[in-house]
Image (cartoon, rainbow, N blue to C red):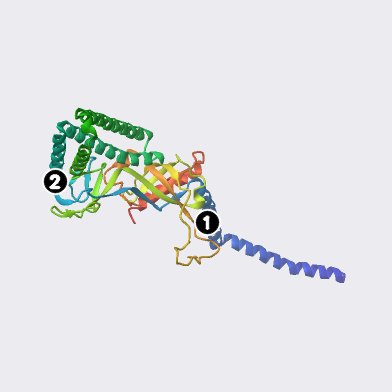
Amino acid sequence: MSKQGEEKETLADEGKPESSAQEAEQKDNHNDPVHQVTKVVLYVALAIFIIYLMADRMAPWTDQARIQTYVVPIAPQVSGNVASINVENDQVVESGDVLFKINTLDYQLALESAESALELAGQEIGASTASVATAQAKVVEAQINLEYVITQSKRVFELEKRQILPVSDGDKARAAIKQAKTQVRSARTELEKSKQQLGQKGDDNPKIRSAVAALKKAQIDLSRTTVVAPAKGGITNLVVNEGQYASVGMPLMTFIDFESVWISANFRENSIANIKVGDSVDLALDVAPGRIFKGTVSSVGFAVDSSSQGQAGQLLDVKGKSGWLRESQRFPVMIKFADAGSREPGLRRVGGQVDVQVYTTESNFLMNAIAWVWIRVVSWLSYVY
């Protein structure tokens, strides 16, 4: 055998053990359970990451949401000692229920004095003013009713604009305003007829006009001694006792509106791109673990306050946060309840926490199915935390 042939055989013999070792190592890695588990974990983590990215755009979720409504401080428009209190803390009241009354003695005397002044003014010009006083009282009553209706309707119009309340509620409010205005016009017409009965001289007499104005003020003040609930709601933070002196504008209790309720949910900026008005929403209330309520998106916020401008005389406030991943900005999304089940007593508590799951499309079955399961898991977890 030649020398070259011997060298080739030697090299071949040396390469066989190395190749066999590599194959054995690969076989060992293939059979190693730790290696297999590591690969499975990596694949699962990658799949979860991809699903998270897709779900965050197609079916966004947030736990930064709270129930909100109108919180109204109840304060008297006239001063005086509190004669009676008709409610207690955490009591449910209906629209028009009497909350409390101010002592009417001073205001009744003022009304009698104003009526006497009008009669004296009429005697001076030789005319009867009784019909004017009666007509003026009807005008005051109609105007107070109109103010009440307008105040109630403003909240309805605002929620109708944001699509939290249906258009039918807005139509009812507009009809109520028209009816109240008609009553005011009718009462004023009767007042003018009564004034005309005094004659041209009486109608233009400054004493008559002054007496009628004083009478009107006395009637309004007397009517304001009774404070009523502006809508259906609850009373809280009651801080007044009978006999206590109440000043004009001093809040004596807080009214929580039960009719105008919505949810304010804060979504990350990169999650709201596909959210639109009318999207279906699943709601998990912390107060009702294991239950899911329906809702719809009524509006999507398009501005938040991010200014760092300091006040006059102060330096600019510059935040020093930096990094590869900056803190995400959140925008408010308003959501209205869409089912009657949420009206059960105790569910719509102002400030209550809510988990919100939005479905931005009905065609993506996979993302919607994952989101459907997730919000229900979160709802059941409310039993724990």
* Dot placed on the residue nearer the N-terminal end, 1 or 2: 1
Residue 163 horizontal/vertical position (percent)? 40, 39
Residue 326 horizontal/vertical position (percent)? 52, 61
Q: Quadrant of the C terminus?
A: bottom left
Q: Quadrant of the N terminus?
A: bottom right
Is residue 270 visible to the viewer in this orientation of the structure?
yes
Q: Between residues 24 and 60, which one lies in front from this camera angle?
A: 60
Quarter assignment of residue 14:
bottom right
x 60%, y 62%: residue = 29
- Residue type, numbered disc 2: Thr
x 42%, y 42%: residue = 298
Image height check: is 375 above or below 125?
Answer: below
Q: Between residues 314 and 340, which one lies in front from this camera angle?
A: 314
Residue 330 horizontal/vertical position (percent)? 46, 54
Residue 44 horizontal/vertical position (percent)? 52, 54
Quickly name the residue at label 2.
Answer: 104
- Residue type, numbered disc 1: Ala
* Mark 1 and mark 2: Cα distance apart in space: 73 Å
Please state if 308 lies on the left or on the right of 241 as rendered. right
- Classify mark 1: helix, strand or loop: helix
x 34%, y 48%: residue = 68
Q: Residue furthest right?
A: 2
- Classify mark 2: helix, strand or loop: loop
Is residue 337 visible to the viewer in this orientation of the structure?
no
Quickly name the residue at label 1.
Answer: 45
Q: Residues within 10 Å of mark 2 (few under 14, many from 20)?
A: some
Q: Between residues 172 and 93, which one lies in front from this camera angle?
A: 172
